Each structure stands twice: as C-alpha cells, then as structure tokens.
Amino acid sequence: MRTWHVTELGDPPSVIRQVEIPEPVPAEDEALLEVEATGFGFPDYLMAQGLYHDKPELPFAIGGETSARVLRAPSGSGLREGQRVLALAGRKGGTMLTARVAATLDRLLPVPGDMPAEHVAVLFAAYQTSYVGLVRRGRLRAGETVVVHGATGGVGMAAVQIAKALGARVIAVVGGPQKAAVAHELGADVVIDHHAEDFVAVIKELTGGRGVDVVYDPVGGDVFDRSRRIMAVEGRLLIIGFAGGTIPSAPANHVLLKNYDVVGVRMRPFREDAAYRRHVHDTLVGMYQDGAIRPLVTTYAFDDLPEALRLIGERKVLGRVVVRAPEEPTA
Ligand SMILES: NC(=O)c1ccc[n+]([C@@H]2O[C@H](COP(=O)([O-])OP(=O)(O)OC[C@H]3O[C@@H](n4cnc5c(N)ncnc54)[C@H](OP(=O)(O)O)[C@@H]3O)[C@@H](O)[C@H]2O)c1
C-alpha cells in the first residue's frame, strides 16, 4: 500500500516521499479500517520541518486523524462491519493516510453514517481544540464577545462556528478580502481584514473602549502582543499556537493592571482523557447534526499532498486540508 513519509527534515513539500508499506495485521485488540480521508494542519507542516514540540524519529508520517470504515473488529467491541468512525493516530504517530490501517479501539470515535468523509476527517484537531479552548479553558459564556485570529484557518474556522453556536458575538480577524468574505460565510458578526485595518483600533471603537471577553489566538507574535490591548476586565487571552512563527511573552504587570487571564491551550491531556474526549466529540456531532457547525475544508487527491503542504506554508488554504486515501485493492 502507498503512503507518504517525511524522510528528512526541511521544506515540507520537498521532504515527503511516497513509500510502500505492508498491509496491516490487526492485533487482538485492534480493528481493521478502510481509510477514506485524512486531515492535515499547520502542526503537520511544522513537524516536517522539525519545528513542532513533538519530534518523532525519521522517517515518520504526518496527518493525525482519519475518516474510516470498519472492515473487521474484535468480537465484543460493539463495532460492526461498515460502521464509520473517526480514527486518531496513536501517541507515537503512525501513518493514517494509506488504504487500510489497524487501530486500537480507544482511538476510534463513532460518527453518523451519512457524514461526508472530509467533514469527519477534521472533527478532532480543529474542532476539539477550539471547543476545549473556548469552553473548558476559555470559560466562554453566551452573550460574550470573542475575537478569533486566523479565522479562516483550520482551528480558526472551527472556533468561529463553535463560538457562534454557543451564543457568543464573534469578531473574525483575517488577511485579505477573499478570507474576509469566507469569514462572513462562516457566520462571524464582524470581520476585520488586517491587511486593510488595525484590529486594535477597530475593536476599541466597536466595544466603546471596554475590550473583549475572549481572544482566540493561533498566530502569536505581534498579534498576541497587540491583543493584550483589547482585553476586557476578566477577559481570557487564549494561547492556541504560533502560526506567525514568533513565541510572544506577556508582561506580568500588564496582566495584573488590566485584570485579564493569559490561558494556555494544549490538547494532549484532554486527548488522553477518553471520557472527556468522547463527551466533546458527541457534543460536536450534535452541533453538526443541528447544522450549527459545518467544516470548511480544501480537499486534495492522495498524490497532491506536497501541493497541499505548500499552500499551508503560503497561508493560502481556506479551512483545513483533507487528503483522500489512495485506492488500493486488497491483496
Ligand atoms: N493548542 C493546540 O492543541 C493546537 C492544536 C491544533 C493547532 N494548533 C496550532 O494552531 C495554529 C494554527 O493551526 P492551523 O492548522 O489552524 O493553521 P492554518 O490552517 O494554516 O491557519 C493559520 C492561520 O494563521 C494566520 N497566520 C498568520 N501568520 C501566519 C504565518 N506566518 N504563516 C501561516 N499562517 C499565518 C493565517 O491567517 P491570515 O492569513 O488570515 O492572517 C492562517 O489562516 C498552529 O500554530 C498550530 O500549531 C494548536
């Protein structure tokens, strides 16, 4: 079966190679799955460069979540042949973009039979991160105002939709008119194009100088620094990531004087908590079935993963990248 491996660290589109791997042989506690499509994001791009906090040994696979169909499952597992699932990569990674994979049952989350594969394949990294960030770490309440930076990126588009579904007022910040139009379609109440306007000035005016309750920041650097100036008293500034490439610092005296919280958001401990992960998953599937969230994805064929990675690096992707599994007949 074909898959993609990162064979050396460097420019992501140049350092991934198509390789042949053997058919998986599931262990007693594993299900055999037919892969449909796999989700990718900025963390995969960083990992291929050796710039992510997780640094697997070479060669390694990227793409940590997959839409799949059960081919065979251990008896007593509760899974039936043909059932559709969201499958997560194990703690040590492993390929999720190939024709078939074996996965332990704790890595599988059930999804509705009619949910399109490209929507299933983004339900974890983008949506669970944004839900945990906004709800658990950010304590977001209905009626509050949220600023989402990078609002048409993978985690950003999910944050806009979840915040709206929870009854918040959403101010989306994006770069360029095309992304601004998309942010409106995602449901943002106000959209600021940072190529044309200074988001600090616009938000100060919009809120009468009060500031906002929550800032969702996957960009870091200067965006984080300037976001400190728009925090309301008891606001929460969520550190989601550093897509801009610079890790900022918050001066403690500013945090004290302005009475806001700087809140770290890392999925690892929440991902390892199976009961909580399932609770968030079921909540998100419910929101999906109610029509409150609808993933924005850009889908590529298996052979086009290098091109997809190139566009992530050039910040041209709208939503999250999904790559279809290769078609390979069983031996
Ligand atoms: N905390 C967690 O557990 C967790 C989980 C998943 C992802 N993350 C992190 O969240 C961040 C975003 O991930 P993602 O997959 O959503 O990324 P993405 O789809 O590529 O979106 C990132 C957005 O950031 C903005 N941006 C600003 N400067 C950029 C730059 N120099 N290069 C690229 N984009 C830039 C872009 O928006 P504009 O062009 O509109 O400005 C872009 O749409 C990453 O740092 C990732 O590691 C964290």
Image (cartoon, helix red, strand yellow):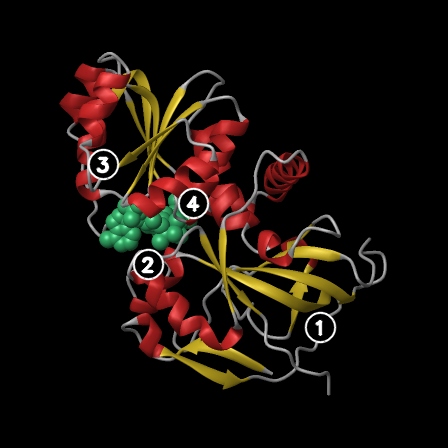
Q: Is residue 115 above or below residue 90?
A: above
User: Which residue does the image show at 49% across and 49% down from the upper left?
Assistant: 125
Which quadrant would the C terminus be assigned to in this image? bottom right
- Horizontal side, residue 35 vs residue 53: left or right: right
Q: Is residue 45 above or below residue 216?
A: below
Q: Nearer the viewer, mark 2 or mark 4?
A: 4
Query: Which residue in the protein does label 1 denote?
Result: 26
- List the residue tagged with mark 3: 224
Task: Identify the residue at horizontal 47%, vertical 82% (top origin).
Answer: 18
- Residue 286 position within the rendered picture, expressed as x and y whole percent measured from the top left: 67, 35
- Mark 2 close to ligand 1, CB under 8 Å: yes
The kind of residue on which mark 2 rests is Tyr
Quarter of the image for residue 71 reads: bottom right
Say which label, 3 or 2, has the lower sequence index: 2
The residue lying toward the viewer, choosing from 301 and 28, is 301
Nearer to the camera, 191 or 38: 191
Q: Quadrant of residue 276?
A: top right
Q: Nearer the viewer, residue 211 or 78?
A: 211
**x then y, percent, for residue 129:** 47, 42
Q: CA distance from mark 3 to mark 2?
A: 19 Å
Residue of label 2: 52
SS category of the residue bearing label 4: helix
At label 3, counting other C-alpha atoms closer than 10 Å, the crowd grade (few under 14, some 14-19, many 20 or more) is many
Q: CA distance from mark 1 to mark 3?
A: 45 Å
Q: Earlier in the sequence, mark 4 or mark 1?
A: 1
Q: Earlier along the polypeptide chain: callout 1 or callout 3? A: 1
Determine the residue positioned at 24% across, 42% down: 220
